[in-house]
Amino acid sequence: MMTANEIRDSFKQFFEGKGHKIEASAPMVIKDDPTLMFTNAGMNQWKDIILGTRDPEPRRRADSQKCLRVSGKHNDLEEVGHDTYHHTMFEMLGNWSFGDYFKREAIDYAWEYLVDVLHLNPQDIYVTVFEGSEEEGIARDDEAAEYWSKHLPADHIINGNKHDNFWEMGETGPCGPCSEIHLDSRSAKEKAEVHGASLVNKDNPQVIEIWNIVFMQFNRKSDGSLQPLPMHVIDTGMGFERLVRSLQGKTSNYDTDVFQPVIQEISRLSGLKYGADEKVDVAMRVVADHLRAVAFSIADGQLPGNAKLDTLFVVSFAAPFVTPTPSWSNVRPSCLSCCPPSSTRWARPIPN
């Protein structure tokens, strides 16, 4: 079984072999773009290139980008810990083409990596294509559907609406139709009873999106209109934690070697067993998720590395199985702005 680090390395090595330059992750806190507070997608650091105001060379790139989603349009905060596949901070594996290859190559590369390199079962893969929008004057993405038909039968290629299959970073900026790749990890019995296509984008925890291939063609203006980009751009994003889960044969991201070392340490320190009580499990998953976000932020130089940070996040994101916190005066405002206290929020007292 591949470790998480080996899986990340395999992605980079594959795309390096396809002529992509491997780039470093940009910091999660954005300092030079007033339209965004946090890096919420892999394309953020390439925004100027996509808009045609920066040199695109080299035109093929790949990376693993740290992303933070706690506010705005792309916000999964309420699902974190309660389900098995959303996170506050996650890694997005991405490959990029700035005016070089487009839909055909991007789809073929994705298929080759997932099926030929990682040996995922093709029968478990479903893809979506943009069904079009009469309001926007955009037709169905028949081109992407045709390229997918080389790899998949028609009942594994699904039309997706504007919400799921027209990707936009925010209210303005680069955007375009996309193809999502979903993986069905249910048991053989469940697959025989219900066709996986009917569960795509239906919040089934075992039929989940792992990769999104965005065909950047437009720039959304402040008046809502779409303007063609100066060049076509491939922008893909694959959920690293979800990919690791699939390859390690788990049904939860939190059961992989990405999170289990942290969860086991939380279990040791709290004296509570992970897997014995769902409320306790939710709490441990939330704490593990947020501690990971803090660790990456410290590595980015965005937060001070001191011993009080662990306490801060345990206090802020602990769960309803421990002693009520008598006062929130000792929790920093920066934490409360993301997750404010409520009558149902509980935590251990802060240790000395």
Image (tube, rainbow, N blue to C red):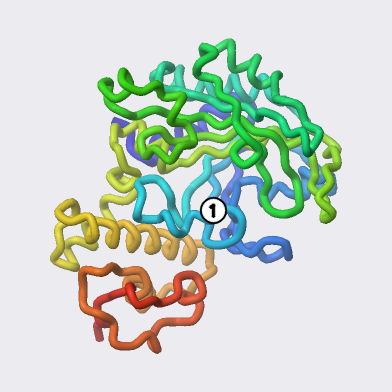
Say whether residue 59 is visible.
no
- Residue at the image position 54 percent from the left and 13 percent from the top: 154
Say whether residue 40 is visible.
yes
Left or right of residue 90, residue 169 in this image: right
Mark 1 neighbour density, 10 Å: few (under 14) some (14–19) many (20 or more): many
Classify the position of the N terminus by image quarter: top left
Q: How many marks?
A: 1
Left or right of residue 133, residue 282 in this image: left
Residue 130 vs 229, above or below: the answer is above
* Secondary structure beneath label 1: strand
x then y, percent, for residue 299: 48, 62
Q: Quadrant of residue 17?
A: top right
- Residue at the image position 32 percent from the left and 71 percent from the top: 314
Q: Which three-letter amino acid code belongs to the residue tagged 1?
A: Cys
Residue underneath mark 1: 67
- Residue at the image position 77 percent from the left and 45 percent from the top: 49
Classify the position of the C terminus by image quarter: bottom left
x then y, percent, for residue 269: 19, 67
- Residue at the image position 56 percent from the left and 62 percent from the top: 71
x then y, percent, for residue 290: 40, 62
Given residues 68 and 219, the one toward you in this image is 219
x then y, percent, for residue 148: 59, 17
